Amino acid sequence: MIVIDREKCIGCGQCVSDCPADRLKLEEGKAVYTPECIQCGHCVAVCPVRAVAIPEYDMDEVEEYDAEKFHLEPEHFLHALKFRRSIRRYKDQHVEQEKLERILQAGRYTETAKNRQGCRFIVVQEHLEEFKDLLWEEVPRMAESIKKTMPHYSMLFKFMYRKRRKDRADDGLFFNAPVCVVIGAENTLDAGLAAANMETMAVAEGLGVLFDGYLQSVVEACPKAKEWLGIPDLPAACCMLLGYPAVTYRRTAPRKKADIQWK
Ligand SMILES: Cc1cc2nc3c(=O)[nH]c(=O)nc-3n(C[C@H](O)[C@H](O)[C@H](O)COP(=O)(O)O)c2cc1C
């Protein structure tokens, strides 16, 4: 539901022009809303006099545009993106709650298809050891179940399991990261976009991330783990490890030439 304050509305028509669902029109010089829409909030964001509200959301969270904060030097941004690395070596250091909360905000504010906002973020820090034990216990069964369909992965998971049994610290699924974030989502692109922004935010906080496809496959194949995480009903779309990097990269990693066609 969109609510327009008729007293405040100056009838500029900005919300009408910007509404992707065409649910707003001008009547007698005032914006009028006809349900239903996807509540994307463009009408709230574009209104010059703050006359529009979506009561279902927390309107106190809406921020005014701040040119100083918004300024991102393109060269600097690209440099930061090039220097982001997948981190597989972490310091034994707790990650502060405030940092995790800002990283989650980056995920929460990421765009989603149909503005569904359907990602569920599970942050495992306090009970990480319990989660690890639960998951590793499931690995032999999971490896056995894919023996025929994916023999290479089956062998790899068995190998990883044996290594970890010998030495708990040799953990090819969790890499001794202090935090694991799982994103449950029906739409995997939604989860991926959120995860990418969360990674950039983590880097800005001095942290490092690893998107862990192997971990994600094990979680997805393990109903017990999904139950434990509270996503029995949702695909585990993304598993990311997070922590302070115990490695310093001095230069960018080389890349293939981009496969681009200009037409
Ligand atoms: C979706 C996804 C899944 C990945 N899964 C794993 C994984 O299971 N184990 C691992 O060590 N690295 C994993 N990686 C990291 C990639 O190997 C890494 O991004 C790539 O080698 C490039 O290195 P960079 O991220 O440091 O630039 C994954 C990356 C992505 C994007």
Image: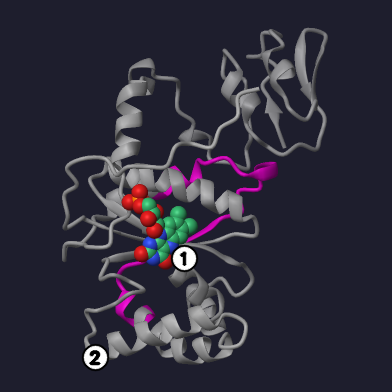
What residue did someone put label 1 on?
Answer: 213
Q: Quadrant of residue 49?
A: top right
The amino acid type, in three-letter code, at marker 1 is Gly
Look at the image and tell me whether residue 121 can be seen: yes
**Residue furthest out toward the front:** 257
Q: Marks 2 and 1, how far apart in space?
A: 23 Å
Q: Which circle marks residue 166 in the picture?
A: 2
Q: Is residue 58 magenta?
A: no
Viewer-proximal residue among 211 and 45 = 211
Mark 1 Cβ inside 8 Å of ligand 1:
yes
What stretch of residues is rendered in magenta?
Answer: 104-131
Q: Position of residue 82 (x, y in %)?
A: 33, 38
Residue type indicated by callout 2:
Lys
Secondary structure category for the residue under label 1 = helix
Residue 238: x and y in percent read: 50, 61
Horizontal and vertical percent position of residue 227: 54, 79
* Left or right side of 20 for 105: left
Question: Which image quadrant: the C terminus?
Answer: top right
* Camera sees residue 123: no
Q: How many marks?
A: 2
